[in-house]
Image (cartoon, rainbow, N blue to C red):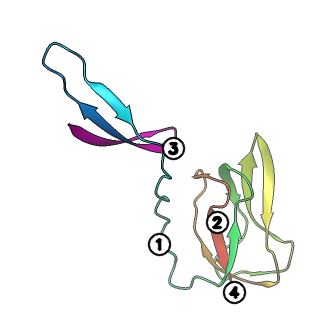
Amino acid sequence: MKSYTITVNGNVYDVTVEENGAASAPAAKAAAPRKAAAPKAKAAASGAGNIKIEAGAAGKVFKIEAAVGASVKKGDPVLVLEIMKMETPVVAPEDGTVASIEVAVGDSVEAGALLATMN
């Protein structure tokens, strides 16, 4: 018997395959799906802040509005995501300074992905 880990559409399955002989096809026994390991996030910049700005929905980074070190007020756009073919601004949750930008223009992001940090 051989064991494999297979990922299908983001779902991870542990599969054991039993070989019955050279002429017959292997029989597969699939285990229940398990959670996929979280993708490794980009290393935060040395000046990473304590206020996280995360994606509200999956999309693509369309434009970065604020540079690292820029002062922003609550509601100021930090970057723009293209979500379902619409440009959606991602705004500062409070007054502060942009500490890091964790994405680049053109990056695809999932809901909840870390986009930037602030102090």
Decide: is 111 above or below 28.
below
Q: Quadrant of residue 86?
A: top right
Task: Determine crowd level at label 1: few under 14, some 14-19, many 20+ residues with C-alpha closer than 10 A.
Answer: few
Task: Decide which of 45, 30 is in the foreground and name it.
Answer: 30
Q: Which label's residue is closer to the chain start, 3 or 1?
A: 3
Residue 2 shown in magenta: yes
Q: CA distance from mark 1 to mark 2?
A: 12 Å
Q: Quadrant of residue 17?
A: top left
Q: Report which residue position mark 2 lands on.
A: 115
At horizontal 76% and vertical 40% (from top left) the residue drawn is 85
Task: Decide which of 98, 38 is in the foreground and name it.
Answer: 38
Q: Which label's residue is closer to the chain start, 3 or 4?
A: 3
Q: Report which residue position mark 3 lands on.
A: 10
- The outermost residue toward the top is 23
At label 4, the amino acid type is Asn
Task: Determine crowd level at label 2: few under 14, some 14-19, many 20+ residues with C-alpha closer than 10 A.
Answer: some
Q: Residue 30, how many percent across, how many down? A: 40, 36
Mark 3 lies on a secondary structure that is: loop
- The outermost residue toward the left is 22
Q: Report which residue position mark 1 lands on.
A: 43
Q: Which label's residue is closer to the chain start, 1 or 4?
A: 1
Mark 1 lies on a secondary structure that is: loop
Q: CA distance from mark 3 to mark 4?
A: 34 Å
